[in-house]
Image (cartoon, rainbow, N blue to C red):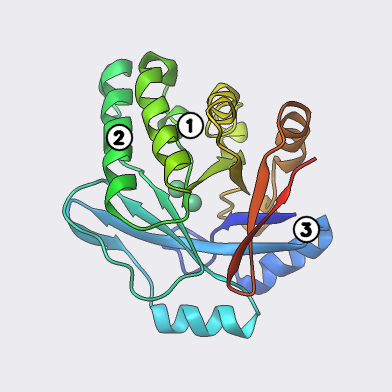
Amino acid sequence: MMDMHVHSVFSYDGKAEIEEIIEECHKKGLERFCVTDHYEYEDGKLAHGFNYEEYAVTMEKFGLPRGVELGWDGIGEVELPGEFDFVLLGVHKFKEKAPAEELVTDYLERTLYVVKNVEFHALAHLDYPARYVQVDFRVREDLVEEVLEYLVKNGKVLEVNTAGLFKHGKPNPDFWTLEMYWDMGGRFITLGSDAHDPLDVARGFEEVLSVLKERFRFELVFVDGGRILSKTLR
Ligand SMILES: [Zn+2]
Ligand SMILES: [Zn+2]
């Protein structure tokens, strides 16, 4: 098992030293993890980044893949500072105060735009705002379907992010979205805890895995020696 979404001290909001994450993984019997620190663009500018050289050297020192969470609100253009083995793409901006349907529409339209306009491997936390505000993404099931269709047709991976379990009681995205993805032929997922604290590595995996194993036969994607591989989840 591999946690494909972990933040370290390289993230502006992360506090986990790489050694601490490694130690926690050993304790939890987790085979490996991928550090995906924030490289975030907002309003056409780089809002949160890190020193790529230092990052690459550190990952190499610990024998870890170079992962990144590229954050983009769809405004202006984005560029990564170097080569990465695994690029998670995530939209973090949403209209917090807007009525639910407007919020969801705006968020999903932004998501559709970013997935089509930058290179990446996996789409992070598709219904991210649900962690913070009461919204039901089913009000725009059509747009959710459009995003998923793009992923399936273009060989992109859908992330199942377990952090939502501890915010609103559901993973991001919710199980009905995973059902929809599976029904339209989506087979590739990654599992990520989105840990910003070393203790949260792999948090919620057991709970989500039991549902995934029961309902689907997804291919679980991970990185090994710089290559993206997958194995059937059963
Ligand atoms: Zn994120
Ligand atoms: Zn994250």
In the displayed structure, 79 sits above or below 185; it is: below
Tell me if residue 84 can be seen.
Answer: yes
Name the residue tied to disc 2: 94
Label 2, residues with CA under 10 Å away: few <14, some 14-19, many ≥20:
some
Residue shown at 30% from the left, 16% from the top: 101
What amino acid is at disc 1?
Arg
* Of pointers 2 and 3, the one earlier in the residue sequence: 3
- Contact, CB < 8 Å: mark 2 with mark 3? no
Residue identifier under label 3: 30
Q: Could you tell me which residue is drawn at 42 percent across and 33 percent down?
A: 149
Q: Is the Cβ of the residue at disc 1 closer than 8 Å to that at disc 3? A: no
From the top left corner, tell me how far across and down residue 160 is, in percent: 58, 40
Could you tell which of marks 1 and 3 lies nearer the N-terminus?
3
Q: Amino acid at mark 2?
A: Phe
Mark 1: C-beta under 8 Å from nearest atom of ligand 1: no
Residue under numbered circle 1: 131
Task: State how far apart marks 2 and 3 are (Cα).
Answer: 33 Å
Marks 2 and 1 sit apart, C-alpha to C-alpha, by 12 Å
